[in-house]
Image (cartoon, rainbow, N blue to C red):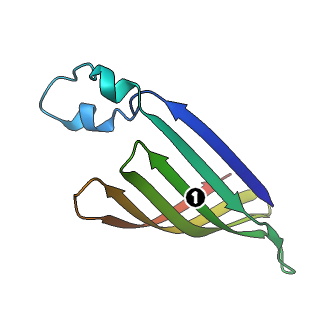
Amino acid sequence: MFFALSPRWGAATGGAQALWGEDLPVLSTADAGNSGAVDAQVGYDFALPQGGVLTPFAEVGMAGADSRRLRLGTRYAAAVTGLEMAVELAGERRESGDAAAEHALQLDVELRF
């Protein structure tokens, strides 16, 4: 089982929107820079009889007074003859202010050889 709790202060650090946007990035206002946030993760590893590990998990994030994120999913990881494989399937819901909630379904596959 794992559990993580991570507090954050200051403006968000994601820069992907700045890379793809047409406008130049600008400094955040003082109010946005002082907002606090917290992220929490919990999950449990199940060893499978045929090999590999299955991990259902949940993640919650809250930023400021009106921004929330919930992510639920499962990961499967295994190693077979020198090949490491990991698959993750997760659903996410993001809410921010009065805007409509955003939903996402994500599938990640990782192979290492």
- Dividing the picture into quadrants, the one containing residue 110 is bottom right
Residue ID at (22%, 23%): 25
- Taking depth in this image into account, of 84 and 19 the one nearest to the observer is 19
* Residue 69 seen anywhere in this rendered image of the structure: yes
Residue 64 placed where, x, y %?
Answer: 41, 42
* Left or right: 106 in relation to 110: left
Question: What residue is drawn where x is 42% and y is 55%?
Answer: 68
Kindly identify the residue that appears in the image at 35 percent across and 50 percent down. Answer: 66
36 above or below 61?
A: above
Can the viewer see residue 82 in this picture? no
Judging depth in this view, the residue of 84 and 77 nearest the camera is: 77
Report whether 17 appears left or right of 113. Answer: left
Q: Is residue 50 above or below residue 92?
A: below
Instruction: Identify residue for label 1.
Output: 59
- Residue pushed farthest bottom? 49
Quadrant of image for the N terminus = bottom right
Residue lying at 55% horizontally and 62% vertically, measured from the top left: 109
Q: Amino acid at mark 1?
A: Glu
SS at badge 1: strand
Say above or below: 21 vs 110.
Answer: above
The part of the image, by quadrant, that contains residue 104 is bottom left
Left or right of 74 on screen, residue 12 = left
For label 1, the crowd category at 10 Å Cα-Cα, with few meaning under 14, some 14 to 19 and many 20 or more, is some
Check the image and name the residue furthest to the left: 22
Residue at far front of view: 65
Camera-side residue of 41 and 87: 41
Q: Position of residue 92 (x, y in %)?
A: 44, 65
Count of marks placed on residues: 1
Quarter of the figure with residue 100: bottom left
Instruction: Tell me residue 88's x, y (percent).
Output: 58, 65
